[in-house]
């Protein structure tokens, strides 16, 4: 990874976990919460600024995590969907680093995200000079994903519950992908939590 590249990161963790019934950000896997795992993985990388976007149950979540060097920002409009957290995160990152060149976006509920996979994603993006590079799993692009500055304005135009994947439907958007076979496992339901417990034993 190029040490001189100005790369920021946003962890999106503002959702209400309505299908699960309690904050999935705090579901534990191998002794730590899913959100803490994501924070810890990113903390080991030379990325700055680091933005954590909270929303629903932010008091409860804040008390149970160590944000390390992340700037914690609250999305008061989290009920309007993921796009509001993306906009909030990018705006806050640009306040801290006006010359930001790339932004990495992660979710807090992918327990199998690793430092190596994120580094690979960043390397591909920097070498290809594309507008974006997504993780690819189950044959589809998804997060973690990284985007160049020229696409920040498009990310800020997302509406409702649209995520960054919406950009691929723009015919002018140039993007690449990095295989991440375990990326399609996230935690949304009690069945997912049970599967996570089984995975701990393997």
Image (cartoon, rainbow, N blue to C red):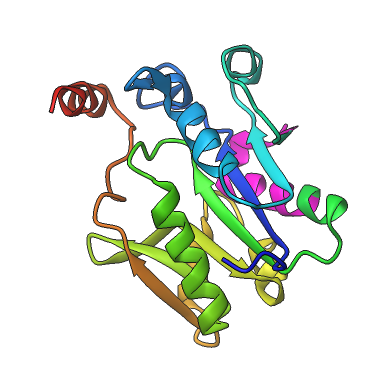
Q: Where are the magenta residues, as a range?
A: 72-91
- Identify which residue, 171 or 177, lies in the foreground: 177
Residue 108 in sight? yes
Quadrant location of residue 195? top left
Magenta highlight on residue 75: yes
Q: Quadrant of the N terminus?
A: bottom right
Q: What residue lies at 64% left-to-right and 21% top-to-bottom?
A: 58
Q: Quadrant of the C terminus?
A: top left
- Depicted 118 relative to depicted 172: above or below: above
Quadrant location of residue 172? bottom right
- Depicted 125 relative to depicted 75: above or below: below
Residue lying furthest front: 3
Q: What residue lies at 24% left-to-right and 66% top-to-bottom?
A: 139
Q: What residue lies at 46% left-to-right and 64% top-to-bottom?
A: 121
Magenta highlight on residue 7: no
Q: Position of residue 173 (x, y in %)?
A: 54, 82
Q: Position of residue 91 (x, y in %)?
A: 79, 52
Q: What residue lies at 55% left-to-right and 63% top-to-bottom?
A: 146
Side of 165 where 49 appears, left or right: right
- Depicted 43 relative to depicted 17: above or below: below
Residue lying furthest bottom: 172
Q: Say how many tags the image has.
A: 0
Q: Position of residue 12 (x, y in %)?
A: 57, 41
Quadrant location of residue 18? top left
Q: Position of residue 90 (x, y in %)?
A: 72, 54
Residue 158 in sight? no
- Identify which residue, 202 or 144, lies in the foreground: 202
């Amino acid at each position: 990874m190029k040490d001189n590249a100005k790369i920021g990161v946003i962890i999106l963790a503002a959702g209400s976990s309505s299908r699960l019934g309690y904050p999935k950000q705090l579901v534990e896997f191998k002794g730590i919460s899913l959100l803490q795992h994501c924070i810890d993985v990113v903390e080991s990388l030379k990325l700055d600024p680091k933005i954590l976007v909270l929303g629903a149950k932010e008091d409860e979540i804040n008390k149970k995590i160590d944000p390390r060097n992340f700037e914690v920002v609250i999305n008061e409009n989290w009920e309007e969907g993921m796009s509001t957290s993306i906009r909030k995160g990018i705006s806050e990152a640009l306040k801290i680093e006006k010359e930001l060149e790339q932004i990495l976006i992660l979710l807090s509920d992918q327990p199998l995200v690793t430092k190596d996979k994120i580094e690979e994603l960043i390397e591909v993006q920097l070498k290809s000079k594309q507008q974006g590079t997504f993780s690819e799993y189950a044959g589809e692009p998804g997060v973690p994903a990284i985007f160049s500055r020229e696409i920040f304005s498009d990310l800020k135009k997302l509406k409702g519950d649209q995520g960054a994947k919406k950009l691929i439907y723009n015919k002018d958007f140039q993007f690449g992908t990095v295989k991440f076979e375990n990326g399609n496992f996230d935690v949304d339901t009690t069945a997912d939590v049970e599967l996570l417990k089984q995975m701990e034993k393997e």
